Image (cartoon, rainbow, N blue to C red):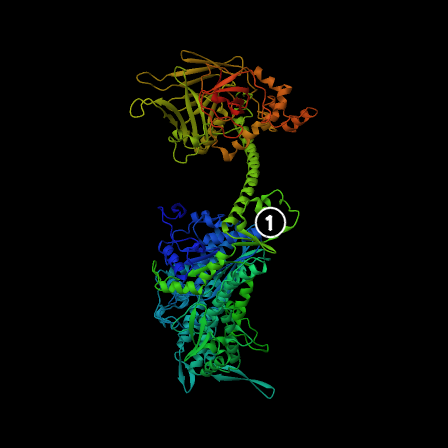
């Protein structure tokens, strides 16, 4: 089990159960105990089926890195430990697969970790979705909106150091290709009252402290920034710092976010001016002078007026008096009423709250403008809303917040408990009902119109209020007692009323309810702000004050009720996913577990009922048509279209994959699958089908790319020898492979290279010493140098007598002075270096030289010097007392394509027949089929492609024997090859044989077309090659010099000294033979003919 929890360095014990559906006992105590076990072992996530439970760890956990993103991407839920990434990936894939909008509802009380969860969801989606620069811009805005909205919308409360004091529903919009290309934020009920007053041990919104801590010296001077205890709006609670929060750093992030979102420098400065202006407004105080309010210190008016671009005297006037319209006898006139001290304080605070709330709305709209797209396609919604909260004093804001949480709980109950059970009944599925508490009764108590609920009564009382007075709140309490006093979930108490919420009883203080619900900004203040010299500030107050006002003004409660119901409707249109956040303690410390607190949350979140419904019910349900559409690919009868009743098609699919009968039930319109594992089985089979199709397409594409690449490489290599050296017939159109030794599977050779050092070329070559004796060496070319590796017998130690690889020479690429070759078609070349030279022979010399020239030019910025002559000299290494001296290689015209060598003293004479002219070029058209018949593209094509550079062992070759000296054995005379052109062997082309060495004249239609013409009128072969083997040849056999492991189904495998019947020697180097009754291909340079 330990290996599953990959983020632990050691194997770990199983910590409780991953999915609480699997608990042996379903009680609140068992659920709490399981969560505690996992929490103490640092596993904060647990499932209840598809619902994710997240416990706040109060510390940074180590499993949110790119590694986890890679691990969870595309994985089934059960494959990895529970994680928010698994839920997010499932949501993203469902959106793409089902073409349906998704949403995630994150719920839990204040401080349970909802905002952090939302951030992880956005971060994951940003990482796994593709896209170009426009999409990246949208991603940046999605991610940068977090620090901006947190600065203006979050604050420290006694329950949470980063509490969301507003609600937001963030829709990330996607293109049909799954790229995030737009977005939209809906915000709910900002807690404006926090701007002007805070409880003890709490703070105002973060942005005020960020400005004070992070502003530059120039900004501090321009905005009149002082210490936080100077400002009345900040010094009421006596709390200015938050543990673990760096306000100065957060200020820089907030400014950066505004930049990314596209807010201009000028507007950014005005945003800061408004924030500073609000702080300075709060310091304007009033004294009572003959029942009227008077500004205590008029000096304090100047700075806020300057920051807001308004006249100080007008500001004083509007804070201490108000214009009122009086109607009498059909006539209307305006009179100016002077305010008392309490009313003036209220007016100042109303202006501050309005400025802040409108600024917040502007920022949300700026983010929406930056992300908007003309039409919606798909979306994932993330609901991060203030959690249920109970404070010592609970006012109107807590009432609204808890109402929204009550609505969210109702959605959860509706969709996971009520709707699920009702669906089973409708579909005729056998079902035993499970009891649960439905909180609709509490929602109705708050929002009902008839009979009137609390909000309706509150609006009625506010409609009859003429001025701020103590009496209105008292009237409200009386009317509530009359309207809902007998309700089971409502009680009165001496200072207000009590509601029995789903999460517990909350006592609300009635003081200020009516005033905060009215939420009226008097026309005088709107007019004042419209007189600002800053267009930006004027635009925050767009009201037209000249129009007649008709009907009731919108109250805060009616607004939040409308927004909550719109939100519910939006969520109901999406496929919902749930994260239930749990707060383990009030100390905000890691590993601190308060049993009673967690149990209370488990009870009110309804987790026990959730588990019971999940265990008794079905994990997955789909209407027949959608199920068929998704899994049709699994059987030929259902793909591409099932002909018959949809229900029968679904049954056929389930039986075809051998799903147990007790794992599913057929409803009237839907199929129900019991366990997630059964669904994962279907998904895996579907993935495998698509995977095999994708591999086929990739194989063909890689083959095509490889052909193109190697044609180009052959061209470039040919240019090196053009007009200078004769070419071999079977070399000019050969595929380039690079690694002929299978370096990835040869650690004994890899040991001499640096870790992850790339291999450009690797082959076994002949190296000639001072006496012209041929010795086998492995030649390896990398970007760092040239390695020559030999083998020696160990003379002492525990490995005495064993043959071990030894690095004989390493050459720096830049140290190569020149490379010498003859003008004939032989395979010899000399590497000239400062100390001594190396005479080598390799049939892949052209490929080696082309790669060496590239690397040399990369390192030295000069071209490598190549010299061509039929008399070559090379210097030999000094050995002992003997001098180094030089040796000579002379090339002469002889017979045949095989070089014959004759050493004599200090001269080696090489004789070889004429090759192709020096001006020969590779064929451009149909090269692949032209040599080695139809087997060659299959072996040379995709396996020689870029993705297959590390192909093991030997590859297509010119000579049947690299691992022996040329003096011992020559190449078979070329006169044997044309016999392959007989009619019999032409038919054999279909059976992976070579057909034509006249590869320079390939017809336009290629070999397959030519074969088609020749086969017309002939009797077709009875079956593929496996059903009718070729007659046993009386011809040659060969002995294996080296072991070879077949790399494909049509290749032979053999050990050293095994005898193979030779059926066909192909010029490409891939021979065909029979071994132990099986026919197949093998590399000719692994054997010698006998």
- The picture quadrant where one finds residue 728 is top right
Give the class, few, some or many, for how many residues have Cα within 10 Å of label 1's Cα (few <14, many ≥20).
Answer: many
Q: Which residue is mark 1?
A: 650
User: Does residue 430 appear left or right of residue 776 in this picture?
Assistant: right
User: Does residue 995 appear left or right of residue 864 in this picture?
Assistant: right
Residue at left offset 50%, top offset 71%: 441
Secondary structure under tag 1 reads: helix
Q: Note whether residue 102 is visible.
A: yes
Residue 216 at x, y percent in the picture = 39, 61
Q: Which residue appears farthest toward the bottom when viewing the image?
A: 329
Residue 734 at x, y percent in the picture = 54, 26
Residue 875 at x, y percent in the picture = 39, 19
Q: Nearer the viewer, residue 359 or 307?
A: 359
Q: Nearer the viewer, residue 905 or 594?
A: 594
In the displayed structure, would residue 87 be above or below residue 755?
below
Q: Note whether residue 257 is visible.
A: no
């Amino acid at each position: 089990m330990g290996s599953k929890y990959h983020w632990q360095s050691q194997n770990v014990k199983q910590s409780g159960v991953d999915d609480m559906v699997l608990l042996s006992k379903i009680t609140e105590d068992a659920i709490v105990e399981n969560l505690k076990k996992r929490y103490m072992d640092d596993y904060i996530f647990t499932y209840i089926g598809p619902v994710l439970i997240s416990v706040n760890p109060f510390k940074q956990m180590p499993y949110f890195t790119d590694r986890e993103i890679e691990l969870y991407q595309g994985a089934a839920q059960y494959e990895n430990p529970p994680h928010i990434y698994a839920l997010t990936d499932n949501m993203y894939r469902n959106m793409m697969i089902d073409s349906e909008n998704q949403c995630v509802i994150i719920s839990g009380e204040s401080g349970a970790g909802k905002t952090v969860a939302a951030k992880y969801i956005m971060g994951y989606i940003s990482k796994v979705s593709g896209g170009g620069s426009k999409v990246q811009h949208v991603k940046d805005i999605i991610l940068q909106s977090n620090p901006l909205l947190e600065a203006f919308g979050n604050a420290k409360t006694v329950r949470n150091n980063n509490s969301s004091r507003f609600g937001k529903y963030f829709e990330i919009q996607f293109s049909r290709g799954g790229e995030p290309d737009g977005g939209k934020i809906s915000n709910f009920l900002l807690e404006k009252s926090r701007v002007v007053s805070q409880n003890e041990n709490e703070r105002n919104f973060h942005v005020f402290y960020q400005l004070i801590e992070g502003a530059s010296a120039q900004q501090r001077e321009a905005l009149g920034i002082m210490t936080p205890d100077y400002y009345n709006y900040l010094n009421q609670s006596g709390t200015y710092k938050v543990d673990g929060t760096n306000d100065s750093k957060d200020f820089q992030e907030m400014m950066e976010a505004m930049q990314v979102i596209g807010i201009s420098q000028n507007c950014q400065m005005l945003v800061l001016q408004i924030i500073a202006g609000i702080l300075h407004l709060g310091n304007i105080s009033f004294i009572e002078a003959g029942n009227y309010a008077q500004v205590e210190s008029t000096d304090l008016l100047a700075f806020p007026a300057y920051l807001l671009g308004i006249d100080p005297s007008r500001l004083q006037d509007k804070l201490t008096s108000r214009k009122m319209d009086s109607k009498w006898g059909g006539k209307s006139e305006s009179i100016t009423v002077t305010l008392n001290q309490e009313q003036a304080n209220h007016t100042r605070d109303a202006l501050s709250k309005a400025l802040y709330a409108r600024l917040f709305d502007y920022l949300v709209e700026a983010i929406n403008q930056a992300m908007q797209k003309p039409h919606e396609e798909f979306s994932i919604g993330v609901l991060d809303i203030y959690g249920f909260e109970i404070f010592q004093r609970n006012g109107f804001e807590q009432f609204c917040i808890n109402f929204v949480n009550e609505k969210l709980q109702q959605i959860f109950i509706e969709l996971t408990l009520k709707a699920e059970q009702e669906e089973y009944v409708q579909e005729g599925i056998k079902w035993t009902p499970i009891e649960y508490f439905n909180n609709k009764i509490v929602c109705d108590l708050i929002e009902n119109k008839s009979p009137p609920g609390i909000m309706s009564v509150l609006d009625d009382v506010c409609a009859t209020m003429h001025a701020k007075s103590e009496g209105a709140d008292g009237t409200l309490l009386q009317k509530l007692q009359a309207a809902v006093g007998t309700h089971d979930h409502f009680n009165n108490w001496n200072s207000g009323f009590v509601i029995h919420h789903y999460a517990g009883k909350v006592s609300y203080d009635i003081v200020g309810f009516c005033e905060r619900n009215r939420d009226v900004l008097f026309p005088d203040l709107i007019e004042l702000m419209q007189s600002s010299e800053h267009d930006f500030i004027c635009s925050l107050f767009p009201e037209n004050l000249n129009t007649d006002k008709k009907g009731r003004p919108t109250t805060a409660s009616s607004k939040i009720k409308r927004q909550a119901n719109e939100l519910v409707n939006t969520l109901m249109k999406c496929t919902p996913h749930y994260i239930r956040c749990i707060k383990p303690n009030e100390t905000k410390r890691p590993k601190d577990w308060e049993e009673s607190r967690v149990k209370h949350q488990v009870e009110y979140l309804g987790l026990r009922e959730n588990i019971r419904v999940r265990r008794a019910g079905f994990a997955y349900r789909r209407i027949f048509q959608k199920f068929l559409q998704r899994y049709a690919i699994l059987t030929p009868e259902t793909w591409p279209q099932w002909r018959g009743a949809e229900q029968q098609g679904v049954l056929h699919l389930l039986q075809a994959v051998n799903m147990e009968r007790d794992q599913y039930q057929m409803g009237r319109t839907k199929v129900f699958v019991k366990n997630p594992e059964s669904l994962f089985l279907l998904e895996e089979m579907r993935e495998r089908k698509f995977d095999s199709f994708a591999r086929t397409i990739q194989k063909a594409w890689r083959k095509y790319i490889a052909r193109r690449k190697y044609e180009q490489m052959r061209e470039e290599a040919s240019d090196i020898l053009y007009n200078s050296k004769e070419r071999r017939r079977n070399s000019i159109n050969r595929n380039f492979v690079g690694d002929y030794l299978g370096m990835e599977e040869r650690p004994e050779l890899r040991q001499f290279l640096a870790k992850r050092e790339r291999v450009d070329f690797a082959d076994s070559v002949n190296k000639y010493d001072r006496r012209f004796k041929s010795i086998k060496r492995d030649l390896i070319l990398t970007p760092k140098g040239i390695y020559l590796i030999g083998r020696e017998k160990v003379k002492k130690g525990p490995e005495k007598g064993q043959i071990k690889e030894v690095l004989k020479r390493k050459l720096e690429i830049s140290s190569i002075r020149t490379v010498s070759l003859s003008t004939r078609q032989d395979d010899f070349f000399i590497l000239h270096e400062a100390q001594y030279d190396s005479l080598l022979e390799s049939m892949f010399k052209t490929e080696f030289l082309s790669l060496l020239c590239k690397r040399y030019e990369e390192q030295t910025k000069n071209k490598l010097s190549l010299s061509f002559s039929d008399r070559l000299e090379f210097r030999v290494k000094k050995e002992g007392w003997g001098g180094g001296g030089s040796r000579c290689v002379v090339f002469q015209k002889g017979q045949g394509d095989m070089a014959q060598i004759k050493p004599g003293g200090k001269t080696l004479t090489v004789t070889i027949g004429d090759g192709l002219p020096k001006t020969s070029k590779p064929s451009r058209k149909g090269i692949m089929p032209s040599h080695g018949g139809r087997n060659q593209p299959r072996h040379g094509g995709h396996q020689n492609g870029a993705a297959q550079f590390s192909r093991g062992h030997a590859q297509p070759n010119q000579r049947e024997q690299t691992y022996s000296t040329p003096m011992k054995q020559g190449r078979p005379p070329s006169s044997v090859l044309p016999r392959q052109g007989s009619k019999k062997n032409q038919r054999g082309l279909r059976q992976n044989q070579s057909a034509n060495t006249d590869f320079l004249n390939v017809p336009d239609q290629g070999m397959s077309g030519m074969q088609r013409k020749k086969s017309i009128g002939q009797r077709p072969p009875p079956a593929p090659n496996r059903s009718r083997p070729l007659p046993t040849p009386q011809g040659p056999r060969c002995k294996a010099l080296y072991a070879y492991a077949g790399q494909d189904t049509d290749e032979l495998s053999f050990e050293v000294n095994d005898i193979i019947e030779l059926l066909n020697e192909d010029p490409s180097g891939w021979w065909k033979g029979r071994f132990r009754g099986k026919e197949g291909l093998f590399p000719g340079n692994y054997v010698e003919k006998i």
